[in-house]
Each structure stands twice: as C-alpha cells, then as structure tokens.
Image (spheres, helix red, strand yellow):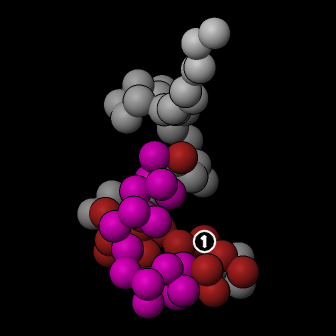
C-alpha cells in the first residue's frame, strides 16, 4: 500500500486578484520570512482588523503591494 503525501507546489496555485484580496501565497511567505517581532506585530494588526497595517507589513516584509 502506497502512502500519499499532500503538499502544495509553489507556483502552481492560481488565485483571483481583487481589491481586498489576501493571497494565500503572501500570507504563507510572510510567516516564513518575518522575524518573531514582526509576526507578533502582524498578529496584533490582524486582531485589531487593521487592513492598512496588514498591507504595510506584507509590503515591508515581502515587497508586495496588496490591493
């Protein structure tokens, strides 16, 4: 019996792009690249529902501008 492994192959996910879109890829990359300090800051931003702060953290860490 073979065992299957579930994984997401980077670059193979197509996402819709629209105003207010939070991409899965960007969120995953943020948590992989951000410092512990920035992760704590991001979690506070998310808890406060601060969309502008969220976009700024993504841009600061990944150099990606969300719409």
* Image position, residue 48 (x, y; %): 71, 84
Span colored in magenta: 25-42
Farthest residue in the top direction?
1
Confirm whether the magenta stretch covers residue 31.
yes
Residue drawn at point x = 37 percent, y = 35 percent: 10
Is 60 situated above or below 14?
A: below
Crowdedness of circle 1 by 10 Å Cα count: few (<14), some, many (20+)?
A: few
Residue 16 in which image quadrant: top right
Q: Which residue is mark 1?
A: 51
Q: Secondary structure at mark 1?
A: helix
Q: Depth check: give the residue in front, 7 or 51.
A: 7
Magenta stretch secondary structure, dominant: helix
Question: Residue at 59% across / 20% down in the picture?
Answer: 3
Q: Is residue 31 above or below residue 12?
A: below
Coordinates of residue 61 in the picture (x, y in percent): 32, 71
Q: Residue at the spot x=43%, y=75% of the render?
A: 57
* Front in this rendered view, residue 28 or 57: 28
Q: Nearer the viewer, residue 25 or 32?
A: 32
Q: Is residue 2 above or below residue 26?
A: above
Point out residue 25 in the picture as x, y percentages from the top left corner: 46, 46
Q: Nearer the viewer, residue 15 or 9?
A: 9
């Amino acid at each position: 019996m073979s065992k299957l492994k579930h994984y997401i192959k980077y670059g193979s996910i197509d996402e819709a792009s629209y105003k207010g879109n939070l991409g899965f890829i960007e969120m995953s990359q943020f948590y992989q690249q951000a410092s512990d300090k920035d992760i704590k800051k991001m979690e506070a931003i998310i808890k406060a529902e601060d969309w502008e702060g969220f976009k700024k953290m993504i841009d600061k860490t990944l150099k990606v501008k969300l719409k």
